[in-house]
Image (tube, rainbow, N blue to C red):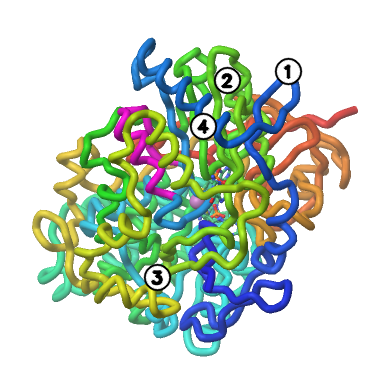
Amino acid sequence: MPICQRDCPGACSLIIEGNELRGDPGHPVTRGFACKKAKNFMRYYRERRVLYPHLRVGDGFERISWEEALSMISDRLKYVIENYGPEEVLVYNYSGTTGLINYHYPLRLFNAIKATLVKHTLCDEAGELALELHFGSKYGAFPEDMERAKLLVIWGADLSSTSIHAYRIAADLRSRGEIYVVDPRVTKASMLGKHLRPKPGTDTLLAAGVSWYIINEFGVDSGFIEKYTEGFDHYASLISKYNPDLVERLTSVSKKEIRDLAESYSELKPSVTYIGKGVQKTKYGAEAVRLISLIPALVGVHRGFFYSNSWRDFDIDYLEASHLGSGRKVNMLDVPRLLADGKFKFIYIYNSNPAATLPNAALFRKGMMRKDLFKVVHEVVWSETAKLADIVLPATSMLEQDDFVASWWHQYFGYSRKVMEPMGESKPNWWVTNELAERMGLEWLKEDPMDAIRRALSKSRMIKNFEEILNKPYVKLEYPPKDLYQTPSGKIEFYSKIAEELGYSPLPVVAWEEADDDYPFRLITSAVPGNTSSQDLIGLSQDFIHMNALDCEKMEINDEDRVILESKYGRVTGIVKIDNSVPEGVIWTRRSAIMLDGFINDLITDEKQQINGGNCLNSTRVRVSKVR
Ligand SMILES: Nc1nc2c(c(=O)[nH]1)N[C@H]1C(S)=C(S)[C@@H](COP(=O)(O)OP(=O)(O)OC[C@H]3O[C@@H](n4cnc5c(=O)[nH]c(N)nc54)[C@H](O)[C@@H]3O)O[C@H]1N2
Ligand SMILES: Nc1nc2c(c(=O)[nH]1)N[C@H]1C(S)=C(S)[C@@H](COP(=O)(O)OP(=O)(O)OC[C@H]3O[C@@H](n4cnc5c(=O)[nH]c(N)nc54)[C@H](O)[C@@H]3O)O[C@H]1N2
Ligand SMILES: [Mo]
């Protein structure tokens, strides 16, 4: 049975019926339901496919053999390492497949040659560290906890688009419990319950306001605080500064709404707070995650949040051979500038389409035009990034490769079996780097990926044994108990010693963004149901620039008018859709949206959060002008 390898919380196990992919009815969480993307996959995976290795010749590409491609790449790698040093080789990878083998194994080669790797910062990494600071590790509530919750708070996530099975659980919960949604936009998910619409980027304040009411009016769970937490007094004095009047004024959420939410947290237990990546992709996003995740601790709920359950005790270092030592890492967000500044002589890209998904994407594409940079892209489809390569290598799709797939939400993990023969001459990620290793004189690195994964999982305490995974459609991973905290004190640390050691504020920072008169609109981009990131572009309609009617009226913009959006990073032209689900002062598009003359990511800020160098995608500021 294949398991979907898109970077979604579902990690759905799928069955093939005729010419269609369907959900596996036996799966305890996804229960037979497959989303639109899975339904379209059988068509998508055949279209735009890279079928053979290709070499750039002038403005076009010519087909070459694998042997030619591999020797050209290995020759160039050797040349760059000898003449410029291994740090001039950059490997850029991300979330094309979440399969453990095809995500991690290729890094073996690049660790062995001490190439430069990317530090992943484009998704949820800042928020993950935020949780580790206070709870020791990031795992939290599971689907079964959501099902049992009396209160569900969905904070900065659009479940109807990005977590369809969680959306179903939330919809079912309406008859038994209470639901709140915190999102500046109206979404299908926000209609499930009480909707709080803070000004974007003010979530630290809102969380502080909720905490203020709990501490000062409804009362904390003193027994729990005494037994399971440290540093509460420091925390309470931080929160005391954010009284409801101040919070109401700065967030635009009324005191009544804030108080109601605080009261629900105090009375309805257990609760689950589903923290989205959207709220975290802001300048103080990780600080917001710290404050939001600590609310349940005030009222006595162990790990009452879900953000990312991707904590696992698998030996990933072994899979990636990082025990051999590795080269340096650069923040992904810096890659466009580094390339444009002439850094690196060789780039190897797999599992990612940075030309459309990185911030400052136009600069990335410009850097990729450099003649002195040798560019190799291993891709399933002719992506925007593949089109910029010197050599394009064909990759197998998720149905054409064996892999092991875990979810970052539920506990079910399994072996995704190859169910189709590879199209054309496509090859899985691990195969390519193994072949390169051989040509680089590093054949000792080569290992059957099945043996490598067996070893990487052999000491895991989350699974019984490896054979079980091979023989069952999925196994349930055993996570550590929720009341175990891997902090220095073994407790929830309101005042974080880990943060102190890392040079961050031990207490969360309550901070918010100021307006920018030159760029008065805030650009929010987020996922839609029909596709993942820049993948699955099939049957998707034209991307629009969504604006509130009041803003349009002030600027005399009509529906379907053309406008220019401009940020410090670039400008693009697009077509307006008047849409009151977007608040005033905000512009929304699909993430990685395709504009008339570029990509929305050409405008996106490459600024970093203090915590973990995380992205600030949703803090992008733009101005709008009508095309006359
Ligand atoms: N504006 C804006 N930008 C964003 C975001 C946002 O919210 N707003 N979100 C960010 C987030 S959360 C993320 S995770 C990133 C994702 O950024 P990317 O990782 O670039 O995401 P994808 O568009 O999924 O690109 C993955 C590519 O890998 C290819 N691929 C799939 N399977 C395989 C395989 O087995 N082998 C190989 N070699 N290739 C494969 C696919 O064809 C696809 O082109 O985007 C970020 N960018
Ligand atoms: N269909 C589909 N599913 C996906 C993906 C996909 O591309 N398509 N991508 C997958 C990946 S890689 C990821 S990381 C997840 C992401 O899934 P989510 O966690 O849902 O994150 P986003 O889609 O980035 O944004 C979610 C919401 O955050 C809101 N938001 C923006 N700024 C703020 C703010 O300042 N405060 C608050 N409170 N809310 C704000 C947006 O309005 C949006 O509705 O989804 C995964 N699932
Ligand atoms: Mo992501």
The residue identified by callout 3 is 413
| Residue underneath mark 2 | 367
How far apart in space, not on screen, are marks 4 and 2 (Cα)? Answer: 24 Å
Which is more toward the observer, 180 or 162?
A: 162
- The single residue placed furthest to the right in the displayed view is 628
- The residue at which mark 1 appears reads as 58
577, above or below 186, in the image: above
Which numbered disc covers residue 70? 4
Identify which amino acid the numbered label 1 is placed on: Gly
What range of the chain is rendered magenta?
103-121
User: Nearer the N terminus, badge 3 or badge 2?
Assistant: 2
Residue type of the residue flagged with mark 4? Leu
Does dot 1 land on a helix, a strand or a loop? loop
The amino acid type, in three-letter code, at marker 3 is: Phe
Q: Which of disc 1 and disc 4 is earlier in sequence?
A: 1
Vertically, is 30 above or below 183? below
Q: Where is residue 160 drawn, in percent x and y?
A: 61, 68
Q: Of discs 4 and 1, which sits in the foreground? A: 4
- Give the structural element (helix, strand or loop) at label 4: helix
Q: Position of residue 585 (x, y in %)?
A: 66, 43
